[in-house]
Image (cartoon, grey):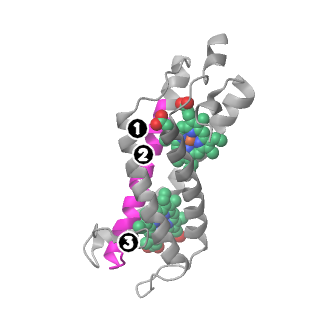
Amino acid sequence: MSNLKQHGDQTYDGMARFLHWLIFVLIVAQFVVGWVMPDVHRDTQPQGLIAWHLGIGATLIAAIALRIVWRVTHRPPPHNLPPLLAVLSRGTHFLLYAALVAVPLLGWANASSRSWAVKLLGVLPLPALAPANSAFGHAAGDIHGVLAWALLALIGMHFAAALFHQFVLKDRVLNRMRP
Ligand code: HEM
Ligand code: HEM
């Protein structure tokens, strides 16, 4: 247990922590907007909250891409978790990254199939990911909605793990990702 208590003395680097919490805030906003915005139909225009969903989405795509490049080029601080927790933690983190890639890409493909422009910071247009009116782009929209729930479930598990570390194991894991 004493080993576990030391776990958390070292933190992720500043950039990794900044991107983790930036993406957290954007994803919370993206879920709220995704649920509150009007249903999207064949002749829906990308206005109002839908435009916000595309705008926040483009920022998320850029932030997640940067985060993955950063993660591949910068090692996390060493951990000393027991093997079972280490495997669970690595597995959940990997699935979180997979969902962080898949969910936005599918939303982007759906926007492209509707010929909606996806612009980074409102200026830089991102290329179309799917042809206009394509069956793939249409299906991508449905899978986007379903996988958003899977992402939410993973975030819930991740949050539960954070609480478990803080209040049951009483180690300093949260300190590793402190804002
Ligand atoms: C992690 C990031 C994202 C989350 C959590 C998210 C979440 C959601 C949610 C909850 C919905 C409503 C689904 C439904 O009611 O069935 C939705 C719909 C949609 N999202 Fe996202 N979204 C994300 C990223 C993006 C991105 C990056 C884009 C495009 C650039 C995008 C484009 C869309 C579109 C076009 C729809 C309507 C799809 C349809 O109903 O056919 N989303 N999103
Ligand atoms: C949108 C929500 C969130 C997403 C997508 C997310 C994603 C991730 C990912 C992918 C990692 C792995 C970092 C790596 O090694 O590359 C991570 C680590 C971490 N996250 Fe989150 N996270 C979210 C919310 C939260 C929340 C709400 C908390 C705390 C209450 C939290 C606390 C942590 C901590 C402490 C770590 C470091 C774990 C370790 O030391 O191994 N995260 N997060």
Which one is in front, 146 or 89?
A: 89
Choose top left, top right, bottom left or bottom right for residue 126: bottom left
Which one is in front, 160 or 120?
A: 120
Is the CB atom of the residue marked by disc 3 within 8 angstroms of ligand 1's nearest atom? yes
Q: Residues within 10 Å of mark 1 (few under 14, many from 20)?
A: few
**In this view of the protein, can residue 154 be seen by the observer?**
no
**What residue do we see at 54% from left, 52% from top?**
22
Q: Going from the N terminus, do you reach mark 3 or mark 2 first?
A: 2
Majority secondary structure of magenta residues: helix
Q: Which residue is mark 1?
A: 71
Q: CA distance from mark 3 to mark 1?
A: 25 Å
Which span is picked out in magenta? Answer: 90-117
Is the CB atom of the residue marked by disc 2 within 8 angstroms of ligand 2's nearest atom? yes
Do labels 1 and 2 touch, CB within 8 Å? yes
Q: Secondary structure at mark 2?
A: helix
Q: Which residue is mark 2?
A: 67
Q: Is residue 45 left or right of residue 139?
A: right
Magenta residue check for 91: yes
Q: Which residue is mark 3?
A: 118
Which quarter of the figure is the N terminus placed in? top right
Q: Going from the N terminus, do you reach mark 3 or mark 1 first?
A: 1
Q: CA distance from mark 1 to mark 2?
A: 6 Å
Query: Is 48 above or below relative to 15?
Result: below
Q: Is residue 3 left or right of residue 92?
A: right
Is the CB atom of the residue marked by disc 1 within 8 angstroms of ligand 2's nearest atom? yes
